[in-house]
Amino acid sequence: MKILVINPNSTASMTDKIVASARQKASAGTTIIGASGINAPASIQGHYDEAMSVPGLLARLKQAEEEGIDGVVVACFDDPGIGACREVFSGPVLGICEAAVKAASMISTSFSVVTTLPRSVPVIEELIHGYGLSHRCRRVRSAAIPVLALEEPGSGAREKVRDEILRAVHEDNCEAVVLGCAGMADLTEWLTEETGIPVIDGVTVATRMVEALVGCGLKTSKIGAYALPIQD
């Protein structure tokens, strides 16, 4: 089985970290192929960045279709262009927000999300509402850090994420926490140990969910909304 894990932004160090996390949790026999966004922003920190990342994302998925890739993980918590991605690719395509919050709902009765910048909070709240899980999400929180701070040694970003998780535990009374940025993927085990609460990373969860869907022989429906684009 071959799974493409694509970071829609163009920061190679973040892509390497994301792909390493996916490979660590993938099943034996699964090949993880990593990719960065094409002509994409260095980070996705708002609606504009998200929109600018989608053309390159779709171009890479069309290529993946030709390469015989079985499934795709879109490794950005904004789940950019997921509907369009499902139109151009035949196998399962999962965004890490959808995967993570649905996983959280399976292991807890409530969860909070900890993301990077405050401007990401309403974007994520809208996504969670669309996935039908607003009633399980206690709060979407910001650690008030730029996305790329997660790539900078000594920035203190991971400590800020940890402290925000601890606040979520005490103030939200949540039973699990979802990490609201793919760049946090490598912190999952450390954060779980530091906070004593299940901490969920969408990259690894989405990877294993794609494996399960492919293993069940399921592909994206091409009848209706996810049919191939009419004009391409």
Image (cartoon, rainbow, N blue to C red):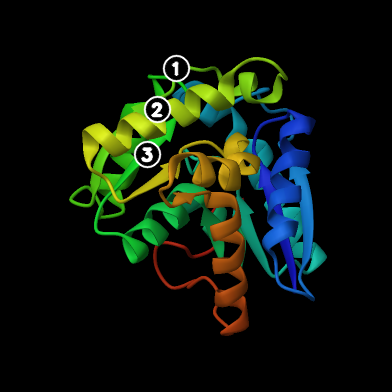
Mark 1 is surrounded, within 10 Å at the Cα level, by few (under 14), some (14 to 19) or many (20 or more) other residues, namely: some
Q: Residues within 10 Å of mark 3 (few under 14, many from 20)?
A: many
Residue 10: numbered disc = none
- Relative to 106, is 216 on the left or the right? right
For the point 76% across and 49% down, which residue is it? 20
Report helix, strand or loop for mark 1: loop
Which residue is pictured at 23% across the width and 52% down the height?
136
Cα–Cα gap, marks 3 and 2: 10 Å
For label 3, the residue is: 113
Q: Earlier in the sequence, mark 1 or mark 3?
A: 3
Closer to viewer: mark 3 or mark 2: 2
Task: Please give the label number shown on residue 164.
Answer: 2
Q: Is residue 219 visible?
A: yes
Quadrant in the rendering for residue 124: top left
Quarter of the image with the N terminus is bottom right
The answer to whether the residues at label 1 and label 3 have Cβ atoms under 8 Å apart is no
For badge 1, the amino acid type reads Ala
Question: Is residue 2 or residue 155 the one in the foreground?
Answer: 155
Q: Is residue 222 above or below residue 63?
A: below
Which residue position is annotated with label 1?
144
Instruction: Say whether residue 151 is left or right of residue 168.
Output: right
Q: Position of residue 134 (x, y in %)?
A: 22, 47
